[in-house]
Amino acid sequence: MINDEFLMYDPYLTFSDPSNDSFVDSAGKPTPPLVARGADEWTLWAIGREAYDLLEIADKSDFTTRFGNHRADIKTWRDLLIKRAKDGKMLDQDGAQIDPSYFRSQPTLELLHGIWSIFDKYSKFRFQYKYKVENFLFACLEELDNSLLGLKAHNDAVAAAVAASNALANAQAITSGSEVYEKVRSDMARKAAIERHNRDPKQVEKRLVFDCYKEWRAKPERYKSKAEFARDMLEKYPHLKSHKTIEDWVRGWDKKAQLKD
């Protein structure tokens, strides 16, 4: 059910009526007119209206079906990213494998950025992805819900609003027909995803582990094995839980430095 996905407003009821000028909840109850609200909500509403119009929704059934397809796509792509990570094909900027659990908790827009970067590498997938541009538009509508929730709770509204704006801009780039514009947006999405990945507490601690790793390789007598190194790192850094993950990092770093056991 759509109402289970959107907590603060109903996108179809909000934007399907051209004469409506406010967010509407699942019961059809509008919030106060936009003229009585601040610029923040007005801007969010305008972003949502543009995303909805680009979707060209025919009716409620069409919205429900296509949104359901969108959620199915996201599950498929989440599973794909997790599988690629398990197969060692998802590497961070240090060349080490990304833990599959990272993708289990990522929001829709972050998964779309990951898939976009993969599809960009293979020309045979580009048409398929262009066809799926509506995933970004639905992601925009989802982020608007997060932003409205943030406004109500006085927490994280700006981050969600920026995410909604970025999702809309990415969709516009893909449909613009401009390869330059699309590449700019793709590069921006990739860099933003890297930055968010690096701010993750586990990634902060990973960089600290990497510093310990360099010290160990400079003074090999510190640890007798990868297993001993991993055990010590688990004791030092509370966000790290997997012994195997740390050993995988070491293997990746060793491979990059062309070191052998």
Image (spheres, rainbow, N blue to C red):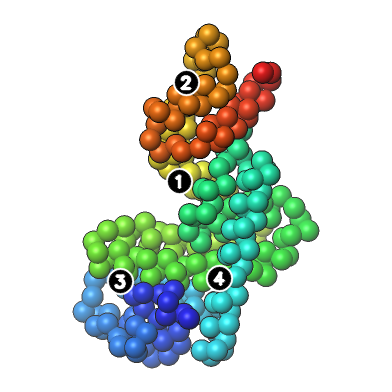
Residue 196's disc number: 1
Residue that carries the numbered disc 4 in the rendered image: 71
Find out whether the residues at labels 1 and 3 contact each other: C-beta distance under 8 Å: no
Mark toward the start of the polypeptide (4 vs 2): 4
Residue 134 - label: none
Gap between marks 4 and 2 measured at Cα: 41 Å
Crowdedness of circle 2 by 10 Å Cα count: few (<14), some, many (20+)? some
Tell us which disc is closer to us: 1 or 3: 1
Secondary structure beneath disc 2? Answer: helix
SS class, disc 1: helix
Considering only order in the chain, which callout, 4 or 1, is on the residue closer to the N terminus?
A: 4
Which residue has dot 2 on it? 212
**Residue 125: image x %, image y %?**
74, 60
For label 4, the crowd category at 10 Å Cα-Cα, with few meaning under 14, some 14 to 19 and many 20 or more, is some
Task: Give me the C-alpha separation between circle 1 and circle 4.
Answer: 23 Å
**In terms of secondary structure, where does tag 3 sit?**
helix
